[in-house]
Image (cartoon, rainbow, N blue to C red):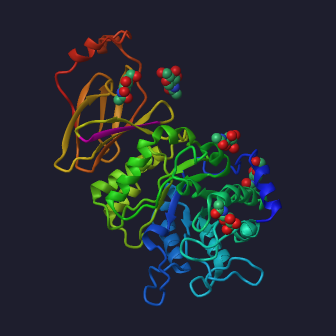
């Protein structure tokens, strides 16, 4: 590579990403997990990577109530381009599968209040073997995307190496900024560095990217969801501090509505992604989605937990030997999300605890089950039982504690443990 490119890359290290985008985790639809690199439009016209697929999804997002809930991105992944750049060296869409071109597709989305994401790779080729965006092409490709009025760009890292990535990811930040068009930037960089420090510098990533894929691709299976969840929560102390408005850890797509998850597991993925303040990109077929999957993906309470303006990523607070795991996410206005998750494989498990045992401060709380909409008032000391299904969740939205009334609640702020034990004779059950 030539000298000037390297100097530019070094000069950039001092600046920060400030494109004003993604103050809450992005929501929308992304082709990859469900549609991969299906380019066989002759035999599989409904599912191949073509403008028709993205227009179909745009129709569904805008007509079936998704857009109003925040699902506005329609994102192209790999295998969209022609195998050759054009005579001026520019990327071009495959002419058979995208006869209208990307700009026209962007117009189609924008008219419907949606946004277009596109995909590239900083190596010699994309993962699927299409033209890559080598260092010398970064500016050109950023300009091309801006001319097409693209709103988001995912930069993958196949067929590159650590040296090239350390130059290319920052250069693309600069090139996107220089176009003058706000284009959200998704970096796959950490996924190619093993996801953790010292190889990944999350401070730097936060200065360069709006979101970043930390870990491997999701597949259409519960095992895959669990391997991602385990990795993110085993490493939560590393990851949580770097999530904030405009900057998100990305555990990859929602596969709800596909083939690999039961309804319980679908509810679990949605809930866990909300706890993680994760981007919500569905990769499914919105044309044929079951009503069960739709109800989960369109759950307003969970979406508002995911989209909480504080943007604090939640954590696992307890991992019981029984296989029950408990997660919590602090939300604005002193509220929180509380999630009980069962890793058991036998039968619904009746888990008994109290908010005090989960370190909630003294007070009286209202909790709302976000899937059943049942609500209940609890003192911090009130013991309760949640019944958690195998591979399922119980998720609560917990309101701010009301002021403690000493006449009602016995306690005086000294927080003596014995007081807790004497309180309850009836234990509420929440299903
Ligand atoms: C480019 O970066 C500057 C400085 O960080 C920022 O003020 C501006 O909004 C950015 N523009 C775009 C289009 O991202
Ligand atoms: C990384 O890739 C670049 C560009 O293909 C190449 O010039 C360089 O030698 C590679 N570096 C290593 C350490 O493999
Ligand atoms: C990580 O990136 C930040 C911001 O670019 C930089 O100040 C810091 O020195 C980097 N840390 C390491 C260990 O390289
Ligand atoms: C949140 O709780 C803290 C500490 O209990 C209190 O000082 C603050 O006023 C509360 N904020 C809101 C918005 O209720
Ligand atoms: C509650 O706080 C104590 C003391 O800081 C801590 O040891 C314990 O792990 C916490 N429990 C939970 C469920 O967060």
Give the x, y percent position of residue 374.
Answer: 29, 41
| Span highlighted in magenta in the image | 323-330
Determine the residue located farthest toward the bottom in the rendered image.
Answer: 42
Which residue is at a point 66% across and 83% down the rendered structure image? 84
Horizontal side of 253 relative to 131 (left or right) equals left
Q: Quick check: which quadrant has ligand 3?
A: top right
Which residue is at a point 30% across and 15% down the rendered structure image? 409
Q: Can residue 408 be seen here?
A: yes
Determine the residue located farthest toward the right in the rendered image.
Answer: 4
Residue 329 in magenta?
Answer: yes
Give the x, y percent position of residue 289.
Answer: 37, 68
Residue 141 in magenta?
Answer: no
Give the x, y percent position of residue 400.
Answer: 43, 28
Name the quadrant containing residue 295: bottom left
Name the quadrant containing residue 146: bottom right
Name the quadrant containing residue 7: bottom right
In depth, the one of 286 and 237 nearer the eye is 237
Horizontal side of 293 relative to 32 (left or right) equals left
Q: Quadrant of the N terminus?
A: bottom right
Which residue is at a point 47% across and 79% down the rendered structure image? 38
Horizontal side of 342 relative to 158 (left or right) equals left
What is the total number of numbered labels drawn onto the structure image?
A: 0
**Rendered position, 136 above or below 19:** below
Q: Can residue 149 be seen here?
A: no
In depth, the one of 106 and 274 nearer the eye is 274
Q: Quadrant of the C terminus?
A: top left
Give the x, y percent position of residue 152.
Answer: 63, 62
In depth, the one of 129 and 115 nearer the eye is 129
**Rendered position, 145 above or below 70:** below
Query: Of helix, strand and loop, which mostly describes the magenta segment?
Result: strand
């Amino acid at each position: 590579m030539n000298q000037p490119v390297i100097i530019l890359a070094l000069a950039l290290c001092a600046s920060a990403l400030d494109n004003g985008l993604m103050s809450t985790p992005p929501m929308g639809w992304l082709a990859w997990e469900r549609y991969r690199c299906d380019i066989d439009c002759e035999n599989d016209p409904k599912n191949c990577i073509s403008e028709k697929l993205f227009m179909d999804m745009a129709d569904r997002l805008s007509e079936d109530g998704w857009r109003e809930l925040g699902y506005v991105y329609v994102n192209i992944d790999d295998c969209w381009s022609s195998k050759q750049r054009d005579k001026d060296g520019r990327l071009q869409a495959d002419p058979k599968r995208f006869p209208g071109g990307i700009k026209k597709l962007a117009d189609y989305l924008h008219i419907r209040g949606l946004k277009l994401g596109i995909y590239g790779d900083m190596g010699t080729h994309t993962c699927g073997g299409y033209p890559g965006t080598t260092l010398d092409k970064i500016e050109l490709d950023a300009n091309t995307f801006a001319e097409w009025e693209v709103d988001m760009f995912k930069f993958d890292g196949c067929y590159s190496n650590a040296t090239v990535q350390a130059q290319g990811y920052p250069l693309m930040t600069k090139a996107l900024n220089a176009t003058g068009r706000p284009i959200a930037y998704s970096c796959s960089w950490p996924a190619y560095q093993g996801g953790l420090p010292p190889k990944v510098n999350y401070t730097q990533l936060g200065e360069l990217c709006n979101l970043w894929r930390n870990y491997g691709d999701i597949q259409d299976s519960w095992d895959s969801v669990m391997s991602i969840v385990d990795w993110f929560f085993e490493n939560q102390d590393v990851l949580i501090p770097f999530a904030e408005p405009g900057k998100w850890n990305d555990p990859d797509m929602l596969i709800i509505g596909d083939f690999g998850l039961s309804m319980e597991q679908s509810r679990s993925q949605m809930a866990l992604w909300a706890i993680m303040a994760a981007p919500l990109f569905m990769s499914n077929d919105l044309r044929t989605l079951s009503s069960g999957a739709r109800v989960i993906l369109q759950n307003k309470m969970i979406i508002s937990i995911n989209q909480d303006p504080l943007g604090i990523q939640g954590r696992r607070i307890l991992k019981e030997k029984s296989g029950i795991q408990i997660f919590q996410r602090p939300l604005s206005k002193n509220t929180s999300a509380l999630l009980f998750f069962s890793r058991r494989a036998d039968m619904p498990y009746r888990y008994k605890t109290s908010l005090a045992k989960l370190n909630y401060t003294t007070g009286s709380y209202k909790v709302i089950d976000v899937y059943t909409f049942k609500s209940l008032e609890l003192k911090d000391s009130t013991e309760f039982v949640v019944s958690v299904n195998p591979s399922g969740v119980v998720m609560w939205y917990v309101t701010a504690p009301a002021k403690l009334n000493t006449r009602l609640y016995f306690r005086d702020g000294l927080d003596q443990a014995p007081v807790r034990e004497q309180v309850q004779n009836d234990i509420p059950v929440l299903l």
